[in-house]
Image (spheres, helix red, strand yellow):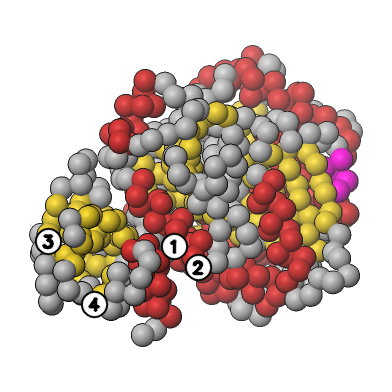
Amino acid sequence: MNIKQLMVTFFIALLAGGEIGARVLTDKFVYSQGEKVVFTFDGKSEGKTIILKYLSKKGEPVLAEIGGEPFVWEVPSEFTPAAVGVYQKEEGQLTYSSYFRVVTPGMLTTYQIAKEEYEGLNVFMLNGGMSAEYTVQKSLANLTAGVSHTWQIGPGGGPKPVWGTPDFLQQSVQHTVDLYNEYLGKSKKLKTVIIATGVPAVPYLSAAMEAPVLPLHFLVSVNSTKEVSSILEYSSQAGVPCYATLGYDASMDDVGVAWIKLLALPDEYRKFIIEHEVENVIIAGIGEDVKSESYCRKLNKTGVDGQEYADGSLYILYTQSGSEHDIKTISRNVVDYDTLSLEKGKDLADWESGVVNRQIDNISKGICEHTPAQVYSLIATHDMMDMYNLGANMGMYFMYKNREQTKVSVQGTYLNEYLISQPLYELTQGYIPLLFWQFVPPVSTIDRIKRDIQKVVDVYEKGILLENKTVHVNARIGKEELVQELKKRGFRFVTKRKDNVEELWNLSDGINSPCEEVVQNIVEQIGVKQYQTQCKNALYLNMGDLKLVTNNIPGLVFHSFKKKLQDVY
């Protein structure tokens, strides 16, 4: 038996409960149509029956009943992809053990990042995941002087689903490390690493500090709470405590989506920090007291009673504070929702951007005790916009630091909606990013240019007026309203992205998406070698620089963790 088989065996044994002879064993979690699933019992199988059910369908219809040797089920050749629950029946009692997933070609069970080369320039393409996985893609582009798109488009207009398996978190963590080792090299020395959620400023922190991002959580698609509970149970038993927030995303059709959140440093991250001789680790995100998409209800008998964010806790998250639309959508996408026993509703940390104190404490402790790296935290404690503004502040400081080295100066402003950016390109070419959420009024977004961005420019390049520089509106939603508001305010040089074009690398329809136009500009105007040299020779921010930058944003707290004398690694 290989390690993966042992882990599967160990996990299902634990869930099946208790004694020798009560354990159901399989060799993997993902099967294809036509494959045979072989079940065995570690111990006596007399009197035991295996019941297979559709977890992906309301009411969990029975698929098969296997009442004796051999315990084998062949996936029908026309079987619809689904999560299949494994139940044991003994003396009339039915007990849930675990599940496996049947997939067809093209379905994802881990996010993917492909790479191709265009005229000598690396182009990275995310498939699956969302904001956290997006930071990995942007980091790869930042660290190789490349470009990347947003993500491959799935049903609903958002990213494609990454379907759950019990080992989803372990596979995601390992795959992240493997991606960096593949594209950067296993022996590449990395001065700084960021462990973070997918706040839009994090890719700019990566670009300005030449640092890869290791996600604090990963997005999984499911149709039942049992799938998420099994992920949490498997991870905990594998030594990686975690909790989850499960809800829906309007851009993803017919699925529930859950952020599976690390509560401790995974061994894969620890090894990565050591093997790449990392000196500094920054834990970054939005503080747990900042409320946004925060209203939730905890599933009873998960985690620890009376504790929030405990290992194994599963929260149902309502993006519209528990509205009728919330309930209707969750009930449709999470098929067992109507059967759940839930605690009273409460506001907790934002489900996509939040970092809770327990994560910071546990992960910083793991790094201090088991690696040589120095640990820092960078947290927006009162207002999410403070972290959004970090992008502009770092961008401006980066230009200031490189004013002699690469002769970069302010050329204008990029209005980047959630979720689009080319951080290294923007910073090295003199464009200050204004990061914004596209569902706020255009007046509020444009107000920030004067209130926040111009102030930063005045500190480092006094006399530069942004209304006399280019403003590029990199938005789809509310684009024309933003353009009109800019013109009303006296901004003279306003450009905008093309209509009805996704931020997708796809040359079959010509050069038209924002990432394709950036690549075209690098190839035809700057020159690929010149751009790569410019990026290579840039002066990147160090920890002292970051402290100076964050001191200018009162709502950001930058903290250094002291190592204890007994800390060893």
Q: CA distance from mark 3 to mark 4?
A: 18 Å
Say whether residue 147 is left or right of residue 450.
left
- SS state under label 2: loop
Mark 3 or 4 closer to N-term? Answer: 4
- Identify the element where label 1 is drawn: helix
Query: Is disc 3 surrounded by few (<14), some (14 to 19) or many (20+) residues within 10 Å?
Result: some
Q: Which quarter of the image is occupied by the C terminus?
A: bottom right
Bin the neighbour count of mark 4 within 10 Å (Cα to Cα): few under 14, some 14-19, many 20 and up: few
The reply, left or right, for residue 324 in relation to residue 447 is left
* Residue type, numbered disc 1: Tyr
Residue at 73% over, 31% down: 382
Q: Which residue in the structure is indicated by mark 2?
A: 238
Per the image, the residue denoted by label 3 is 65
| Residue furthest to the bottom | 1
Q: Which residue is mark 1?
A: 234
Q: CA distance from mark 2 to mark 1?
A: 6 Å
Q: CA distance from mark 2 to mark 3?
A: 30 Å
Instruction: Give the residue drawn at x 81%, y 36%.
Output: 553
495 relative to 220, above or below: above
Q: Comparing marks 2 and 3, which lies closer to the viewer?
A: 3
Q: Secondary structure at mark 3?
A: strand
Image mark for residue 44: 4
Q: Residue at x 20, y 74 (%)?
A: 45
Left or right? Give the position of 347 relative to 434.
Answer: left
Amino acid bearing label 3 = Glu
